[in-house]
Image (cartoon, grey):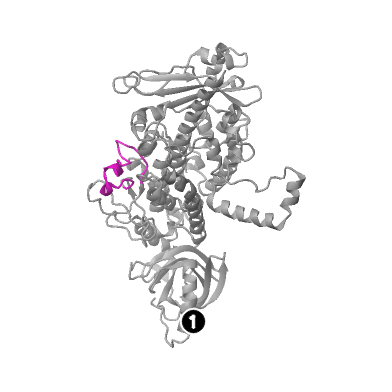
Amino acid sequence: MEELVGVELIKLKAVVAITNSKRDCLREVMLAAFEAFNANPSHGFVSLQLVSNTFDPRTMKPKLSKEATLPLKPNGNIMAHGGNRRTINHDVEFAVESNFGIPGALLVTNKGDKELFLENINIEGIADFVCNSWVRPDKVNNEKRIFFCNKVYLPNETPEGLKELREEELRQLRGDGEGVRLMSDRIYDYDVYNDIGDPDKGLDLVRPTLGGEENPHPRRCRTGRPAANTDERAESRVEDHDKTPIYVPRDETLADSKREAVNRDKLKGILRNIVPSLVARLSTESDVLKGFSDVNGLYRERSLVQPESQKNRIIEKLPIARVLCKIQGLAEEIVKFEPPKIISGDNGCCLRDDDFGRQVLAGINTLSIECLREFPPKSKLDPSIYPLQSALKEEHIIGHLDGMSLQKLKKLKSFNAIEEKKLFILDYHDIYLPFLNQINALEGRKAYATRAIFFLTSAGTLKPIAIELSLPPSGGNIPSNRVLSPPVDATSNWLWQMGKAHVCSNDAGVHQLVHHWLRTHACMEPFIIAAHRQMSRMHPIFKLLEPHMRYTLKINAMARETLINAGGIIETDFTPGHYCMLMSCAAYRDWWRFDFEGLPSDLIRRGMAVADESKPHGVKLVIEDYPYASDGLLIWSAIERLVQTYVNYYYPNSSTIWSDTELQACPELRAVPLWGICPKPSTTNAAALA
């Protein structure tokens, strides 16, 4: 910094918080003890330089402070940090000219040997810099890290002294799309899912690329790994995920507490699979689980001694009984699963129709139930390939409508007659049927494409009244459709239970592959990448989104390692097997729409609600006792009010939206062939457009 003659230099006191991960803490303590005997310990230093919001009239560049240096050594004011990490506060002084102005940015260079986690920097009474970022040594990358003051600016409101740095930070995050990414990189870029297969290990692990015209799928974060040896279209796999995990930008990795929680759950999963795996290996029979009792045996018991009598209550008080209870509890905690709440009080509930209907509204997958708009239901598949629409007929359901005629039910076509919406459907026909021949050719896999019809009773509950099981044409054979009705004898009872089991199997697959993986994880990744590539940390919308984007890229990368990969957990545990991810692609191509992802729009799309401006949430539910929807709308409305208030503060009119260059650059998503159908916005409401 060139000093002006006669301009006084003043000193700004600051506190710099650097956090060590838990794995580094013991090492730091040992190093400190060792270096007590070393007269000249050397750890390197961190260079810090403040940048003013205003220009220097001599250089027409931002005003800079003198560089302050922070020695990297295990001293300073140590603070506990959640038991997992420790934060060391270092005192630093910045020398600036008296006309320096307000500090708006900070340039950081790590001259040490290892990366450090810069938590925050507080300049006493003037400015705060919330960093929460890893800074790698300059010998790895000599670009100075840029941190901005904890204040937001739209692009056209950026102080003159920060405009160039705002662009430079985004340039660093975008990268150039070349080369293999290092684990210390911070680059966000797009790529297709060409790394879930492992062709180098055999043809049975070859999987198609997800993303593109043939198999549309949202993009992932680019890693730049080299191609597989046997297939140049496939990216090579990472062999040891623990030592060399799949690349995500450095600050997307899990914090210590999150990582430890994941590792604990992973260890529990491994331990709890020991017993079933041993039984499977030692058993000479092909079917290890022969009945519900075998399934229930995988879960923990509620207690060792059941207090059914006075004698048992006396036994429970004995020291040996308490010891045995503790031993059993510890063993079951390690090797057995937590019992699902639905069966914790009644193991036989899964066989009952009322519980089957209840799970549709309040179970694991509450996102698939739809109001039946026409009977019989119609398929959207190509009729030249799948000619049979449905085998469902009036006689299959007429006896289960509580005396109501089907003709009366046909009034359901009137969307205003909400009180007459009585028929509902779980329709997995179109998503499963195109894949059934391949699925059923897999060893140990058998499936139907299912439709389940439900009737809304006068008590407000759903009861299943018909199940359709469909198979596609195969080898010249005509397609097969069979309808099951509620049982009247022992034989029809077990056929009915089998039908419900196939519905549940379809339901589990769609929940995992469509509603969970596709909608919750995969579709979010390109939005997160775009936000980091196009929006500065100073952008108000980025500040709003940042907490909700955290960890998603890392979790998705971990999914590519062990969940959705060839031979992974998803393919192993779900009926579609090798074709799981292709079903996700089909749902993305044929069904997913960005403008229907909001809860009210989704409910209206499925016929589970109708628009009603008189209601607080703008919709009226068709079924009142629908916990996912009723509770979800409360949360949705609270979030909507918060976001509208926040967004309208920064965007008082539509012109501020159109003039926001960073926000307008985010639709680079549209240039990448990953976007589902979404009409252009027709409203000028600021919150909606943003």
Q: Position of residue 294 (x, y in %)?
A: 53, 39
Q: Where is residue 533 in the image (x, y as percent from the top left)?
A: 38, 52
Q: Is residue 103 visible?
A: no
In-front residue for pair 496/376: 496
* 197 drawn magenta: yes
Q: Is mark 1 on a helix, strand or loop?
A: helix
Q: Where is residue 107 in the image (x, y as percent from the top left)?
A: 41, 68
**Main secondary structure type of the part rendered in magenta:** loop
* 335 drawn magenta: no
In-front residue for pair 551/269: 269
Residue at 42% from the left image edge and 27% from the top image edge: 448
Quarter of the N terminus within the rendering: bottom left
688 left or right of 379 in image: right
Q: Is 10 rendered above or below residue 651? A: below
Q: Is residue 437 visible?
A: yes
User: Magenta segment, which residues?
Assistant: 195-219
Name the kind of residue labelled 1 in the image: Ala
- Occupied quadrant, residue 490: top right
Report the residue that reaches farthest toward the right.
310
Q: Where is residue 656 in the image (x, y as percent from the top left)?
A: 46, 46
In-front residue for pair 75/469: 469
Q: Residues within 10 Å of mark 1 (few under 14, many from 20)?
A: few
Residue at 46% from the left image edge and 87% from the top image edge: 37
Q: How many dots with numbers?
A: 1
The residue wearing badge 1 is: 33
Report the residue that reaches farthest toward the front.
284
